[in-house]
Amino acid sequence: MTEKSITIALAGNPNSGKTTVFNNLTGARQHVGNWPGVTVEKKEGHLTFRGWRIHVVDLPGVYSLTAYSLDEVVARDFIVDERPDVVVDVVDASNLERNVYLTVQLLEMGARVVIALNMMDVAESRGYHIDTAELAHLLGAPVVPMIAARNQGTEDLLATVLEVAAGNRPAEGMTLSYGRDVEQEIVKLEKLLAARPPAGSYPPRWLAVKLLEDDKEIIKKVRQV
Amino acid sequence: MSPHEDILRVRDESLEHLRKVHGDDAETLIADARYGFISGLMKDVLTKPAVARVTATDRIDGFVLNRWLGIPLFLLILYAVFQFTFAVSAPLIDLINTGLDKLAAPAAGITPGWLGSLLADGIIGGVGAVLAFIPIILLLYIALSILEDTGYLARAAFVMDRLMHKIGLHGRSFVSLILGFGCSVPAVMSARTIENPSDRLVTILVTPLMSCGARLPVYALLAGAFFTAYQGLVVFAMYAIGVVLAILLAWLFRKRLVPGESGHFVMELPPYRLPTITSVAAHVWERSWAFISRAGSIIFVAVLVIWAMNYFGVLESIGRAVAPVFGPAGFGQWQPAIAMIFGVLAKETVVGTFGTLFAGAEGSSGFAAALSGQLGWTPLVAFAFMTMILLYIPCVATLGIIKKETGSWKWTVFTIAYTFVLGWTVATLIYQIGRLFI
């Protein structure tokens, strides 16, 4: 029984339809609490799909994963500390460019991401055409087109999540290149961080980037040890 | 101090360095890289109906990234860069050469005779001949840094991405190749950003074919001597031959040596920016300093060895033993053979060798007289020799980094072998075919 149970995290911008996706997935089987130590609301739920018990954690809606807001810190700490089997990133297809900023940051963290490309109907009504296969290919993450408001695509999303969790479908992610000069400094820091890793299972490259971004939380973590 | 304070100290140094070079904090640079990635990604996956709101970057990109205009425009810009570089640097180089001439005469008069010869022929003739080209190096690096900092080089790679795909590589390989215009060593290292191992290997193997800054003095010397009116054009031809052969060889290697599917990545498109003086100055300084310090170290030593071997009469016999190999290419004399042997240490040494062996021939007209008078060179031979210098065995620093990055002696030796065969073949073809027409 235990081996057929997985945890997924729902990430996404505010207004990307994340709550609707969460409701479609879990129905009434949800409860609301608080994230430990902070007053940010934590919604969790569960469902059973094809014999798998799927635990769903709804992360706060955020645009970015910096240390500037509590919501963002809560979201990224959950991904790093609890290592959910899959992170479902709900993306507003009618606002793709802005929403993908979060997707890129999730991938930079090395999370296993499935992109729920929501609001396809709105995107189409505006005349946008999105090459979903190419998007999946370039980001190294599966893309599932959805219209959550009409509960379309939920089944596809769950099937894809299971395939990724079971390792039957590659979600290899991607490495962002920050330009020659910044990369030089990243390599330097990455080496030091890999030799003496701070607590937690943060990837050294991500830590190096965060240190250069002057991320106060990460600096604190590095200093603590 | 705790080890983690150590990490933070290194971080502070990194931040300081990046701020100095770019005038921006690292946070902005990293966010720019993300936005650049996303705007490249959107170009690939999102088609929007024509909209009213167009940014300046969109408008320039509409022109620069145009399917038909993109590549011709890239070549035109490259050509303009060389014309600019040569036009502005020529009077400066003449000035330096006149100064060196004035130094050499009294130096040669010093007794004992060998010391005068060492100073005049070896140091002033050899090392001076290399240093005389500093203006051209500075100007080329200024032009390249401006193209890089404005965001144009990223566009050039984006435009080439389509072409690169057809030959089984992707545009990120072209980013490494473009860096090769500066120096092959960082260019080979930059191939690390290519994830697919086959793509990476092929990129490393062909990067040395890109014409680096160290080869420029050789072209400048010979083009100045034999192609006075068309210097810019001839040097542009060298760079173009390098690019075309790198792409061709990449296609061949991808097909024969390391087949397999090529990875596809997003090409970053950062927004256009005005380059800052500090950023351009920092990049130019970093690259030019490498040139100057090589002239003072490895080239200085090489020139001393060449001078000594020449002074004691052993150089010529070594050169004569090797020279016949290059007979079919038109430069089967002992002096160019020696220049090529020592050129493997660093390509500028070719100029240093000529400077020592034809001491007293300062300036373009002096070298033209020496090379055509003593060696019987024609413009055709000079052109064939320039392609040989472009293509043959990479310098030792590049070979070292190839060994380090591929972790394999096999690929390092392969690079030596294929570049030599390629250089010899192309030079011979140019000379033999050219002879039919001239």
Image (tube, rainbow, N blue to C red):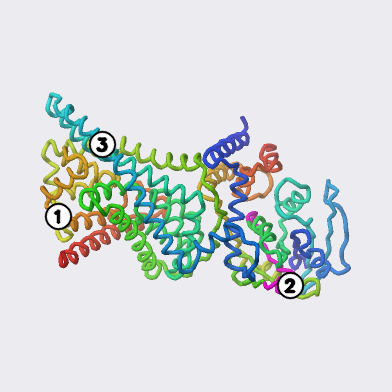
Distance (Cα) linking label 3 and label 2: 69 Å
Label 1: element kind: loop
Q: Earlier in the sequence, mark 1 or mark 3?
A: 3
Which residue in the protein does label 1 denote? B332
Which residue in the protein does label 3 denote? B128
Which residue in the protein does label 2 denote? A146
Q: Nearer the viewer, residue A191 or B365?
A: B365
* Number of the label disc, if any, that sits on residue B258: none
- In percent of width and height, residue B369 lies at 14, 46
Is the residue marked by circle 2 packed among few (<14), some (14-19), or many (20+) residues within 10 Å?
A: many
Distance (Cα) linking label 1 and label 3: 26 Å
A117 magenta-colored: yes
Is the residue marked by circle 3 packed among few (<14), some (14-19), or many (20+) residues within 10 Å?
A: many
Label 2: element kind: loop
Distance (Cα) linking label 2 and label 1: 71 Å
Q: Which residues are magenta?
A: A108-127
